[in-house]
Image: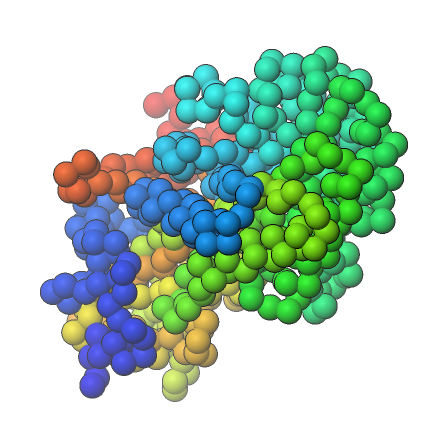
Amino acid sequence: MNQYIDLIKQTFDFPTKEFTVENDQLKFNGVDLMEIIQQYGTPLKLTYLPKISENIQNAKTYFNNAIQAHDYKGSYTYCYCTKSSHFSFVVHEALKNDIHIETSSTFDIPLVRSLYEEGKITKQTYIVCNGFKRDLYKQYIAELLNDGFVNCVPVLDNLSEIDYYLEHVNVPFQVGIRIAADEEPKFGFYTSRLGVRYNDIVRLYEEKIKDNPKVSLKLLHFFINSGIRDTAYYWSELTRFIQKYVELKKIAPELDTMDVGGGWPIKTNVFFDYDYQYMADQIVKNIKWMCAKNNTVEPHIFTEFGSYTVGESGAVLYSVLAEKLQNDKELWYMIDGSFITQLPDSWGLNQKYIMLAVNNWNEEYHNINLGGLTCDSMDYYNSEAHQFNIYLPKVEEGKKQYIGFFHTGAYQESLGGYGGIQHCLIPAPKHVIIDRDTDGSVKHWLFAPEQSHESMMKTLGYVSPTEGK
Ligand SMILES: Cc1ncc(COP(=O)(O)O)c(C=O)c1O
């Protein structure tokens, strides 16, 4: 058992739904990755669009199954949290699935306007506006409301935010309130800085919403930073949240929705065994039970899944440029990209991804470290979620090794400052989009070539040597 393929089969339950091997080479969701590399070269980011719709449909199924199983009276609404990936091809694909939008900051609103102009959303689409807001964000929200986006719901992040809308919105409108959740005990502070503290919520409602015919309270929102996990911490925070909903509902009869935020996990290792259906069941069951106990109408449930919508659609493919043996046992594979700039979560959060060889699966393997191109000694990747080593095929003289990081589709471009200045001026890789035709055949096209030096020179205030030639 010294071939790479044997190692992977013995370590994981392999092949999986997403990963298969044919003729020594990896396929990702049935897509021949070597064919993509041969056509476009590396480094290369890709988005496999069908995965976005598949995941949205799966989440809807899990929640609707739970609603049916528990004879739950409320409905389920899927919102896409745009900050996970603002790219048009992602949002357009997501919107094919009868979903709604959650925004995080000012520039999301021009994005929403553009979606409306293109006919991708209507004025009935829910636009759930989160975040601690600067005046321009509040202004854009007020303009949406005044323009008839009736389901635009600013979620109040503090006690005074509502004053702006009361002054500038000319039509009746709805708001939400975000509850400041307590962070996990191991966190650096106790309560989230985002949202309104538990004890202030009733007062906010009574002082500014209750007797004002212009505004009504639509939803109560909560978001748990560590995600929707089967832990005592998650269930106890959820329970506290439902209790507050039930208490508020007694004085705010128009309140009818509970937004349980994002944080539906994705597969970041091949051992992943999260039970989505069980989690949806438990959420619905908990809310139902507490409502029954308090004689409260069961609320509609909103989610705002970002990573879950887009994470598993993304991958980044690299070539091994060279090997470097830096002492008797530490062998480096130098890649044609950078972890810091292109997979910043792997550097900043120690996030692990699924990492696999793309070719040479029948070669012997060995333990290596992966090194990025920047000068930073932290620009490396050398452990996986389940083990402290990484293994890749040995590269025979004259052969090339390609590797892939998978399920990287959420947050990496915006955190890495896609299209801007990167550490050591490492360019953003080219980006290829992959889709399937109605007959199931694979099609792909280039969304953007590798970032050019001209674009960086321009941002830095230099005249590019090629400019004007
Ligand atoms: C308010 C809110 N909703 C939704 C999300 C999306 O989270 P995820 O990408 O984990 O689903 C976030 C992420 O930070 C958030 O802050």
The residue under the point 75% across, 49% down is 244
Q: How is the image coloured?
A: rainbow
Q: Is residue 98 left or right of residue 255?
A: left
Identify which residue, 92 or 241, lies in the foreground: 241
Residue lying at 41% horizontally and 68% vertically, measured from the top left: 272
Of 288 and 44, nearer the camera is 288
Query: Eyeballing the image, is 172 above or below 91?
Result: above
Place of residue 310 in the rendered image (x, y in percent of width and height, measured from the top left) = 42, 46
Image quarter (top left, top right, bottom left or bottom right) of the C terminus: top left
Q: Visible in this render: residue 381?
A: yes
Q: Quadrant of residue 434?
A: top left
Based on the displayed image, in which of its 4 quarters is residue 156 positioned? top right
* 23 lies above or below 8: above
Q: Position of residue 401 (x, y in %)?
A: 24, 64
In-image side of 129 versus 395 (left or right)? right
Q: Locate the N terminus and report the quarter of the image it occupies.
A: bottom left
Q: How many marks?
A: 0
Furthest residue to the left?
23
Residue 299 sits above or below residue 340 on the image? above
At 38% from the left and 45% from the top, the residue drawn is 57
Observer-nearest of 327 and 169: 169
In depth, the one of 260 and 333 nearer the eye is 260
Residue 394 visible (yes or no): no
Q: Position of residue 332 (x, y in %)?
A: 37, 72
- Residue at the location (84% across, 37% down)? 204
Residue 239's spot in the image, x, y percent? Answer: 68, 58
